[in-house]
Amino acid sequence: QVQLVQSGAEVKKPGASVKVSCKTSGYTFTSYEINWVRQAAGQGLEWVGWMKPDSGFTGFAQDFQGRVTLTRDTSTSTAYMEMRSLRSEDTAVYYCARGIRGDSAHDYWGQGTLVTVSS
Amino acid sequence: SYELTQPPSVSVSPGQTARISCSGDKLGDKFACWYQQKPGQSPVLVIYQDTKRPSGIPERFSGSNSGNTATLTISGTQAMDEADYYCQAWDSATVVFGGGTKLTVL
């Protein structure tokens, strides 16, 4: 069965960086896009960016351009999201999600990773 | 930037039909999808490409999209359907989410 398993919660200080992993299984990793979405406590969903695992091509929401890097390791079917220059407003649950082929919808989601930015 | 607008809350009695709207400029020209999210859980896709249901999603969930509005319809709403619902579309190479609607079944 398709699974996306994310790394554990992180606590970071303002200005630091964080790298979240998303290990996939149950399907061909390079055949489906991986998206990253975040959700602050009590707030809605906010799209961060996406990656095509076969080519490494990426796209980002304007608010995250230049501050987020998306990478992957095809040998382990794992996607990564690194965010730099963290600020308190980045405190949120970060999700990875698989994109449906030929559509922008996301059919499988990771369990989420809480990133807390606090001094 | 493109925006999707949802009502903050919708209430429905058990067994009745709930309709949640999502508005955006010429949204009908794009594909819309919908997610259900219960407290402390990851979102679950319930409708994609306007009207399609993923495997395992009950038939009582349906969708439509025309003009400037996409609609998620839940027929015979059950208590287990109480959740937050988000619409989503794709515009100018970006994913856009609506602000979410809290569905209360009372």
Image: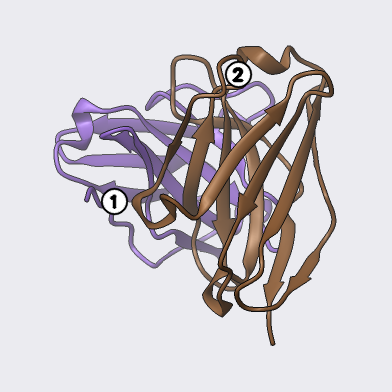
Chain colours: A brown, B purple
- Residue A87, position in %: x, y? 55, 75
In the picture, the disc for residue A15 is: none
Q: Secondary structure at mark 1?
A: loop
Q: Chain of mark 2?
A: A
Q: Quadrant of the C terminus of chain A?
A: bottom right
In the picture, the disc for residue B4 is: 1
User: Circle 2: is it few (<14), some (14-19), or many (20+) Cα within 10 Å?
Assistant: some
In this view of the protein, which residue sits in the foreground, B22 or A115?
A: A115
Residue labelled with disc 2: A32
Q: Quadrant of the N terminus of chain A?
A: top right
In this view of the protein, which residue sits in the foreground, A101 or B57?
A: A101
How much space separates mark 2 and mark 1, taking CA atoms? 25 Å
In this view of the protein, which residue sits in the foreground, B6 or B94?
A: B94
In this view of the protein, which residue sits in the foreground, A81 or A103?
A: A81
Q: Does A32 sit left or right of B89 as displayed?
A: right
- Residue A36, position in %: x, y? 57, 44
For the point 41% across and 24% down, which residue is it? Answer: B51
Q: Does A36 sit left or right of A11 as displayed?
A: left
Question: Looking at the picture, do discs 2 and 1 lie on one chain?
Answer: no
In this rendering, is residue A43 above or below A49?
Answer: below
Q: Chain of mark 1?
A: B
In this rendering, is residue A71 above or below A86?
Answer: above
Residue B17 visible somewhere in the drawing: no
For the point 22% across and 51% down, which residue is it? Answer: B1
Tag 2: amino acid: Tyr
Tag 1: amino acid: Leu
